[in-house]
Image (tube, rainbow, N blue to C red):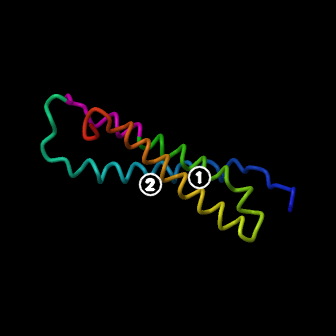
């Protein structure tokens, strides 16, 4: 087992966080664009909450993906496992962010 780990590179972390947030923003915009007649009880600016919460969750998912980097550098089956866990972790974080963002509106 290799005990050496590579240091976290700030530029790489920022890029992955921005990418995670951008993916989440695009997905929530596509999802919200399908709403034809919103419920008047949701208020006039009901889209602001999901448009803030979901991309924030995407940024956190990108951070999680980046924090798994040391495991991906170990090679072999650990690389495959770490990549799988990173992707599943991102999807779970994004799902939780979507539920929190849409709570009280589309997700009741």
Tell me, for residue 23, which label it has, or none: 2
The residue tagged with tag 2: helix, strand or loop? helix
Query: What x and y, as percent, mark residue 80?
Result: 65, 67
Residue at 32% from the left image edge and 35% from the top image edge: 103
Q: In screen coordinates, is 41 left or right of 91? A: left
Q: How many residues crowd mark 1 within 10 Å: few (<14), some (14–19), many (20+)?
A: some
Tell me, for residue 15, which label it has, or none: 1
- On screen, residue 30 above or below 46: below
Screen quadrant of the C terminus: top left
Q: CA distance from mark 2 to mark 1?
A: 12 Å
Tell me, for residue 39, which label it has, or none: none
Screen quadrant of the N terminus: bottom right
Q: In screen coordinates, is 102 left or right of 39? A: right
Query: What x and y, as percent, mark residue 11?
Result: 66, 50
Question: Is 52 in front, or is 10?
Answer: 52
Q: Is residue 108 magenta?
A: no
Q: In screen coordinates, is 34 left or right of 99? A: left
Find out whether the residues at labels 2 and 1 contact each other: C-beta distance under 8 Å: no
Q: Quadrant of residue 99?
A: top left
Residue at 45% from the left image edge and 48% from the top image edge: 94
Residue at 28% from the left image edge and 40% from the top image edge: 107
The residue tagged with tag 1: helix, strand or loop? helix
Residue at 48% from the left image edge and 53% from the top image edge: 91
Q: Is residue 44 magenta?
A: yes
Which residue range is magenta in the image?
42-53
Query: What x and y, as percent, mark residue 79?
Result: 69, 66
Q: In screen coordinates, is 28 left or right of 46? A: right
Q: Earlier in the sequence, mark 2 or mark 1?
A: 1
Q: How many residues crowd mark 2 within 10 Å: few (<14), some (14–19), many (20+)?
A: some
């Amino acid at each position: 087992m290799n005990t050496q780990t590579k240091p976290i590179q700030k530029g790489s972390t920022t890029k992955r966080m921005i990418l995670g947030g951008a993916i989440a923003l695009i997905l929530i915009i596509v999802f919200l664009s399908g709403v034809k007649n919103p419920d008047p009880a949701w208020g006039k600016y009901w889209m602001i909450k999901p448009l803030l919460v979901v991309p924030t969750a995407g940024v956190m998912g990108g951070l999680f993906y980046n924090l798994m980097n040391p495991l991906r550098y170990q090679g072999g089956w650990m690389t495959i496992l770490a990549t799988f866990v990173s992707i599943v972790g991102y999807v779970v974080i994004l799902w939780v962010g979507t539920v929190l963002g849409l709570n009280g509106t589309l997700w009741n």
